[in-house]
Amino acid sequence: MADWAETTGSAEGLSLFRRFRNLLLGALTFFFFLFAVSPLLLIVYVAWDQGKSALNWNFVSSMPSGFPLGSEGGILNGIVGSLVLVVIASALSVPVGIWAGLYLWQDGKSRSAGMVRLLSDLLLGVPSVVWGIVGFYVFSTSTGWGFHWGFSALAGGLTLGFIMIPIVTRVTEQALRDVPMSFIEGAYALGATRWQTMRSVALPGAMAGIGTGILLGILNVLGQTAPLVFTNYYNTGIPSSLVGSQGAVGDLAMQIFIYVHEPSQLLHVKAMAASLVLLGIVLALDLGIRLMTWGSRKIAGRTL
């Protein structure tokens, strides 16, 4: 009887210890979760607290005006310009990055693939201001050896596209590696060609990861200002051309940068409101890309 009581007491003590350990681990997990999201919550809180008074429909649907410029009107030029730059950058980086990722996945152990991977890693570490200088000499300046487009949306967008390429490439490669090898081997066993396997099995299975890579690249370029200083700078209107002396576009990140360096307190408030709009665009792009990848995976699942 004594042994039974001792065993029961030991079991109860062990149970209490396990419950305490689980409670402690849960509390630590919750703490680190709050610690991880606190920067985002702080950004949203400060931007909302300082910029909510300027946030209205007129702010997002009208052009900047007044003196100093921007004290009246809104940021429509920055919204349109940011989207134009993202479209141009994505048009270059998405196909190139996905194809490069496919190549690294298919021939990952070859010497040439190793060189491509090394080059991609090096490009990831290039400072954005260096990309801006390169873009200036290749796309913008009239005294260089490039295209002589001046400060323009095309010059800025292509420069941002080169920044996106290594991000999309490496995330695409990793997403393809996460596709179960049994799926690939099953497709080959059924007689599928290499191209059919990539198109119908590998890419649909990696689409969520590829979409995440594209989103990471877009988020990276949406916040860039240094490359645009050298290639696009800023426009208070909406241009009719993407190249030439009148081809520059507005950009939200650059607009925020300019506003916060003005002495006007009103422009500081508008910079905070523009930050909220930029966060909203980021959220909308995130949801849009996730819906697209989810839909493409469902379609691919029905066709397999």
Image (cartoon, rainbow, N blue to C red):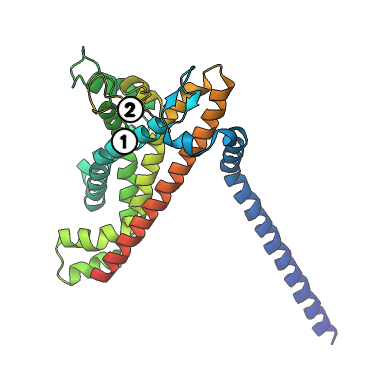
* SS class, disc 2: loop
Q: Quadrant of the C terminus?
A: bottom left
Left or right, residue 288 beside residue 51: left
Specify the quadrant of the image occupied by residue 190. Answer: bottom left
Query: Camera-side residue: 45 or 100?
Result: 45
Left or right, residue 32 beside residue 84: right
Residue at image x 78%, y 71%?
Answer: 13
Inter-mark Cα distance, 1 to 2: 8 Å
Query: Camera-side residue: 210 or 60?
Result: 60
Instruction: Work out whether mark 1 precedes mark 2 in sequence or the reverse, and give the earlier one.
Output: 1
Q: Residues within 10 Å of mark 2 (few under 14, many from 20)?
A: many
Specify the quadrant of the image occupied by residue 300. Answer: bottom left
Tag 1 residue: 84
Q: Find residue 276 and report its horizontal and vertical position in percent.
A: 51, 38
Most distant residue in the right direction: 2
Identified by mark 1, the residue type is: Val
Identified by mark 2, the residue type is: Val
Contact between labelled residues 2 and 1, with CB atoms less than 8 Å apart: yes
Query: Camera-side residue: 235 or 219?
Result: 235
Which label number is shown at residue 249?
2
Query: Camera-side residue: 58 or 93?
Result: 58
